[in-house]
């Protein structure tokens, strides 16, 4: 009898996001020696952190999801990552 494959219901599907090469190179330099396995893993980590912060504010009933400090911080992070 043949083996029966188990279907993984919780399997995550992946897509592709394009980033400018200078940004990818900056990320590679930033994660070197940190144990972060890849640029994709780092980008997913950063986006999860940002999105969870926004979700927390939504849950707490804050209608203005970003404070002025949040906006400045986000702009600074994006500029550091190569977005102007």
Image (cartoon, rainbow, N blue to C red):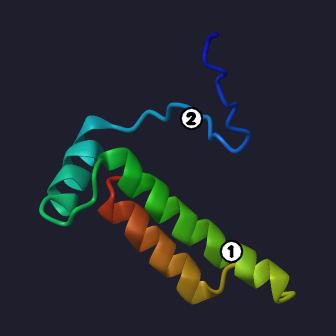
Q: Quadrant of residue 24?
A: top left
In the rendered image, residue 29, in percent from the top left (x then y), is placed at 15, 56
> Residue at the location (62% across, 11% down)?
2
Which percent across, then down, holds residue 18? Answer: 44, 33
Q: Quadrant of residue 4?
A: top right
Q: Which mark is residue 14?
A: 2
Closer to the camera in the image, 13 or 5: 5
Q: Toward the viewer: 54 or 82? A: 54
Which type of secondary structure does the marked residue at label 1 adopt?
Answer: helix
Q: Are there few (<14), some (14-19), or many (20+) residues within 10 Å of tag 2?
A: few
Using the image, determine if residue 39 lies above or below residue 1.
below
Give the numbered dot on residue 72: none
Residue at x-position 39% and y-position 38%: 19
Q: Residue at x 81, y 79 (%)?
A: 58
Furthest toward the top, the residue is 1
Q: Secondary structure at mark 2?
A: loop
On screen, residue 38 versus residue 46, left or right, reads: left
Q: Where, quadrant-wise, is the N terminus in this rendering?
A: top right
- Tell me which corner region of the image, top left, top right, bottom left or bottom right, holds residue 63: bottom right
Whichever of callouts 2 and 1 sits on the residue coming sooner in the sequence is: 2
The quadrant in which the C terminus is found is: bottom left
| Residue in view at x 67 percent, y 31 percent | 6
Instruction: Locate residue 25 relative to residue 45 in the image: left or right.
Output: left
Q: Can residue 66 be seen in the rendering of this structure?
A: yes
Q: List x then y, in percent, for residue 76.
A: 40, 72
Residue 30 horizontal/vertical position (percent): 20, 62
Lateral position of residue 24 relative to residue 72, left or right: left
Q: Is residue 28 above or below residue 62?
A: above
Q: Which residue is mark 1?
A: 54
Q: Of all residues shown, which one is farthest toward the front?
A: 1
From mark 2 to mark 1, how far is it between C-alphas? Answer: 23 Å
Q: Is residue 84 visible?
A: no
């Amino acid at each position: 009898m043949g083996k029966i494959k188990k279907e993984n219901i919780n399997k995550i599907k992946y897509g592709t996001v394009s980033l400018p090469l200078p940004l990818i190179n900056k990320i590679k330099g930033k994660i070197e020696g940190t144990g972060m396995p890849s640029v994709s893993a780092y980008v997913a980590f950063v986006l999860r952190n940002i999105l969870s912060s926004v979700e927390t504010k939504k849950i707490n009933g804050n209608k203005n999801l970003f404070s002025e400090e949040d906006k400045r911080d986000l702009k600074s992070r994006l500029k550091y990552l190569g977005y102007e």
